[in-house]
Image (tube, rainbow, N blue to C red):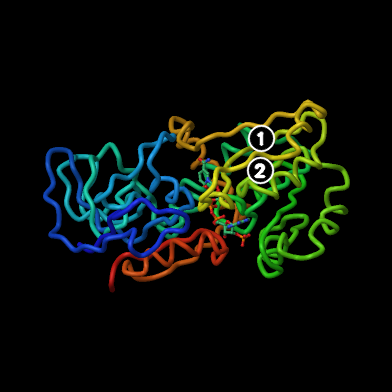
Amino acid sequence: NKQYRLAARPVGVPKDSDWQFASEALPEIGADEVLVKNHYASLDPAMRGWMNEGRSYIPPVKIGEVMRAGTVGEVVASNSPDFKAGDFVSGMLGIQQYGKALAKDLTRIDPNLAPIETYLGGLGMPGLTAYFGLLDVGAVKEGDTVLVSGAAGAVGSVVGQIAKIKGARAVGIAGGAEKCAYVVDDLGFDACLDYKSESFLKDLKEPLKTGVDVYFDNVGGEILDIALARINRHARIVICGAISQYNNTTPMRGPQNYINLLVHHARMEGFVVFDYIKRYGEGVQELAKWYSEGKLKFRTQEETGIENFPSVLLKLFKGENTGKLVLKLLDD
Ligand code: NDP
């Protein structure tokens, strides 16, 4: 059972020496436990935060522990009446080829509806983040202009598509012309702006000429400030993430333009998808319905080889992923 454990708390960008690669015998299962062969692991920006010491919405991964990660896979042995060998499940079994969990901590997934890795993306945690973040925190309404950063990524790509389903305009921000073309041509956003382009600030003007009603922030930093400069009265700023700041070695600074919240009677609110755990069923059902009707498209970027985990994780911070980044854990 090949696996990656956390060896040290990183300073800045995680280094190879922050990880320990190990191989162990398969775990024994106890009462109500299930052994799962993990086909894919989800690689998430949040993993960087879980490596840090300190208070957060979830305890840090301990030094020496298998790195926490969302997984999908197949049941190989079960001591629970709820699962049998051959069932497909999602869980948080970490960066390892096999893992065990209590049956109550696993969710059955339907491989006939979508490829199983989709349950790490649009039909999983990132899809639910987009769903509850935009509809509940962002309170999107028909006719709104929704601006979303990280628009070609796992969460952002779903945010813009749900905005369109709800009759809003969707404007994305992403790194590079290729990603922007994907966001507009494949996902159906009204516009997408390349923040790496020299003309970015000029390019924003036309698609945002009626201002921003909802800004869904995945990146923080300077782009958050640029968005705050364009908000409308009663705008909602959804703080979903701040990936541009996760590898900082100096404290994060707040936005300069925060006073626009006062000027425009706007609201800025952070949330964690886990807040909605009791409503996941409702969210997945709705996302699956839109997916089956062809109204939602999901893209997965599959990387292979558990050995490559440290370098594949860094792709998130270099913008080297489009859609949901997953790692295939099994050798075959
Ligand atoms: P993505 O699939 O969007 O991958 C990360 C993307 O971030 C990269 O592809 C890159 O795209 C962009 N990025 C990286 N560095 C920078 C930078 N310095 N400036 C601007 N953009 C950058 O990841 P996810 O969809 O999984 O996550 C998106 C955000 O949502 C993250 O901040 C994450 O922490 C957050 N999140 C929050 C949750 C919650 O419960 N609140 C739950 C899940 C995710 P590009 O090429 O466009 O730069």
Q: Which mark is residue 13?
A: none
Residue 88 visible from this viewpoint: no
Question: Helix or strand or loop: what does disc 1 sit on?
Answer: loop
x, y percent for residue 211: 83, 42
Q: Marks 1 and 2, Cα distance to the nearest angstrom? A: 8 Å
Residue 7 drawn at (x, y percent): 29, 55
Instruction: Answer left or right for 281 relative to 258.
Output: left
Which residue is depicted at the point 66% across and 63% down?
Answer: 175
Front residue of 105/213: it is: 213
The answer to whether residue 45 is left or right of residue 322 is left
Give percent across and percent down for residue 9. 36, 50
Residue at image mark 1 = 138
Dot placed on the residue nearer the N-terminal end, 1 or 2: 1
Of tags 1 and 2, which is closer to the observer? 2
Tell me, yes or no, whether the two marked residues, 1 and 2, touch with CB atoms within 8 Å.
yes
Amino acid under disc 1? Gly
> Which residue is depicted at the point 23% across and 40% down?
102
